[in-house]
Amino acid sequence: MREDPSIRLIEVISGSQACLVNDMHSYRREVWIMHRKEAGEMSKVMVNAVAHIMRERNIDEKDATKYLEEYVSHLEDKFVDAVGKAKARYSGEDLKILERYASGLQMVCAGNFVWSTVCGRYNRFA
């Protein structure tokens, strides 16, 4: 199963979703750190999807975040579709394993969203 491209697609989609959700929530903290006087040179480099979209599309933070929210929603729809297609390829115990794996990936993404939404690390900068 690990060599199946449909399984790899599910992993890539869920990983992308988790990274982008994290970037949307961490952006303001990263800006704050970048502007601190005692920040080192590495802290002054912004590697974040919000900043990237702002530069690429010449838009502000609000519009970049909205764009990413829509893209994340698209990824979530794509995940559901990819899981459905992958499930059609398996049966029996392999199907049960795939269902547990896909469910686990969904839980990781949901947990990442919840944590990012409520944690002090990101939300004191909102």
Image: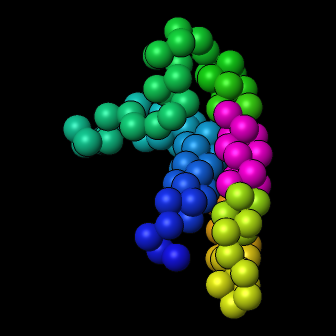
Any magenta on residue 81?
A: yes
The answer to which image quadrant residue 42 occupies is top left
Q: Position of residue 93 (x, y in %)?
A: 69, 90
Against 59, residue 117 (above or below) is: below
Residue 114 visible in image: no
Q: Position of residue 72 (x, y in %)?
A: 68, 40
Residue 101 visible in image: yes
Against 52, residue 123 (above or below) is: below
The residue positioned 68% from the left and 25% from the top of the image is 67
Any magenta on residue 2?
A: no
Spot the residue most to the top.
58
The answer to which image quadrant residue 25 occupies is top right
Most common SS among magenta residues: helix
Q: Position of residue 82 (x, y in %)?
A: 68, 54
Q: What span is colored magenta in the figure?
A: 71-82
The residue positioned 72% from the left and 26% from the top of the image is 66
